[in-house]
Image (cartoon, rainbow, N blue to C red):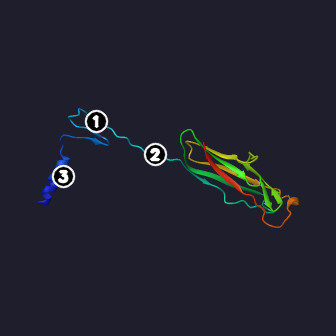
Amino acid sequence: MKKILSMMLLMCFILPGPMILRTAGETITQASGGNSGSLTVDYNAGVTYTVTIPASVTFSDTEKEVERALQVNNVVLNAGSKLNINLTSLNHFKMMCGEGYIEYSLKVNHNETPEGNNYTVLTVPAGENTGWAILNFSTDLQKEHVLYAGNYTDTLTFTVVIN
């Protein structure tokens, strides 16, 4: 008996008959005089990005030039906007130890030299998914300003700004 009842229900769904289309927010019936309806299909993509900053740069007496890559991936921005990565040096491109220091320079993509702080090292416009910049660090390790034994350091801060 269960098999017969199941088959009858199945046939009700398969056999053609008066059709009523239903969509979100709309009901169409023969009495309403309509014969079509619509629905909206959408996806809201939020702003996303992944910035990979080099972990460190270490100079030595034999390693006076170091190259690192700054990468941006998975970029999704609002139309017309752009992602800028700005750079600030805590000690204005000097590695410090007490009052001693060692100057170094930074070139971006082998030809631009940042001057001052809040320098834009990379821009990725909306519609592009990735971006990268080559950071070339160099020093001549002038020792006349090395006053103390110890670790001479500077901190570079990369800030993401979307405009």
**Mark 2 nearby-residue class (10 Å; few <14, some 14–19, many ≥20):** few
Q: Which mark is residue 134?
A: none
Q: Nearer the viewer, residue 125 or 100?
A: 100
* Residue furthest out toward the bottom: 149
In the picture of the structure, the residue carrying the numbered disc 2 is: 44
Q: Residue furthest top?
A: 33
Mark 3 Cα shell of 10 Å, populated few (<14), some (14-19), many (≥20): few
Query: What kind of residue is marked 3?
Result: Leu
Compare residues 99 and 140 and report the one nearer the observer.
99
Q: Badge 3 is on which residue?
A: 10
Residue annotated with mark 1: 36
For residue 89, side relative to residue 4 (left or right): right
Q: Nearer the viewer, mark 3 or mark 2?
A: 2
Q: Secondary structure at mark 1?
A: loop
What SS does tag 2 mark? loop
Which mark is in front, 3 or 1?
1
Looking at the picture, does residue 87 appear above or below residue 147? above
Residue 120 coordinates in the image, percent (x, y) = 68, 46
Residue 3 placed where, x, y %?
Answer: 14, 59
Near mark 1 (Cα within 10 A), the count class, few <14, some 14-19 or many ≥20, is: few
The residue under the point 23% across, 40% down is 20
Which amino acid is tagged 2? Asn
**First in sequence: mark 3 or mark 1?**
3
Q: In the image, what residue type sits under mark 1?
A: Ser
Secondary structure beneath dot 3 equals helix
Circle nearer the N terminus (3, 2): 3
Taking the view exactly as shown, the residue that stands out farthest to the left is 1
In the image, residue 123 lies at what x, y percent? 64, 44
Label 3 and label 1: CA atoms lie apart by 26 Å
What residue is shown at x 84% (from left), y 60% (from top)? 100
